[in-house]
Image (tube, grey):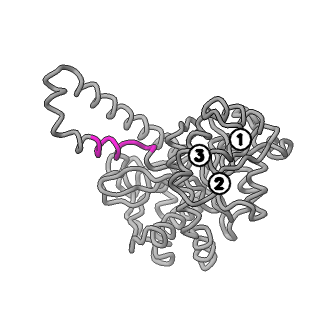
Amino acid sequence: MLCGGDNAPDANIKGAVKAIKEIDSEVILLGNENVINKKIKEIYNKESISEISDRLKIYNCTETIEMEDIPTQAIKHKKDSSMVVGFNLLKKNEGDVFISAGNSGALLTGATLLVGRIKGVDRPAIAPMLPSYKKGLMLVDAGANTNCKPINLLQFAEFANIYLKKIYNIDKPAIGLLNIGTEETKGNDLMKESYKLLKEKAVDYDINFVGNVEGREAFSGEIDAIVTDGFTGNIFLKTVEGLGKLVKRSLTESLKKNLLSTIGCIPALPGIKRFTKTMDYKEYGGALFLGVKKPVVKAHGSSDEYLFYFTIKQAEKFAESNAVEILKQEFEKL
């Protein structure tokens, strides 16, 4: 199930059409049926989406949750919004995974109130995968919880530990605490107390806690996950995305600066393409929403068709991996 975003419905439709050719799942577009069908006619010259694929569906929704809406009020009063409809379908097992590029606050509120938290979870968290040296790096939390307590960061580490072990088959994921220095005494009160708690509970919860990690060391390839509060995590995430865009743009401009540099780069093109692909955050899809009872994926608000395409493919793997059930079982043991 797919909805929301700054570029909806065009990007959602194009991403779904592109992805449906490479996945086995059915994709349901949540939104105004008349608007979606009008776009289908405009973009593909088809009268209905089923003419493109019988695995593409539309579920009509008449309301929209806007970015400026207060999350709790929006979830409570906009019953026919694509987000509320999507969560209810997920809860009733009429969908396997829900993808939204809409209001992050409403997504957190809806997932918590309508779908529900895993038993024992204090707060769910957004956990995107980022590029790192020869591997991926999980970031928890990337924006769901701007005000956290040490227990939240401990649980974020538990999320990452269980997920990376069971889904990525990493025997002992190296999990660090994002901080301004590696020393135990560095950081604000939250980071100092979180360090103490993580160090104290690491053995009990079988967490390979490697201590404080500075931002510049996060992508060394020696760290599998970093945990932080959602405020810091969101700034970190968007800084990484912006830096990736800068590197890609600067590299392209440098190679096209003159005829000599353009000709000279031809033998290196395969390597350059691999490099730019590694730096492109779109390749990593959306962010998993860990800690709720059903699979939920938060897509970037500015997602284009390619990011939706990657996110849909990622969501199918997320659902097939049975990750949420594994998290529920493992987390409840703790």
Q: Which amino acid does label 3 sit on?
A: Ala
Q: Which residue is drawn at 82% across and 38% down?
A: 62
Q: Is residue 159 above or below residue 49?
A: below
Q: Give the quadrant of the C terminus.
A: bottom right
Disc 2 crowd, CA 10 A, few/some/many (<14, 14-19, 20+):
some
Characterize the local packing of mark 3: few (<14), some (14-19) or many (20 or more) Cα atoms within 10 angstroms: many
Element on which disc 2 rests = loop
Disc with the residue nearer the chain's start (2 vs 3) = 3
Q: Nearer the viewer, mark 1 or mark 3?
A: 1
Residue with the mark numbered 1? 48
Identity, as a three-letter code, of the amino acid under mark 2: Arg
Residue corresponding to mark 3:
16
Measured from the top left, where is residue 38 in percent x and y? 71, 31
Say if the magenta span includes residue 279.
yes
The disc, 1 or 3, on the residue closer to the chain's N-terminal end is 3
Magenta extent: 273-282
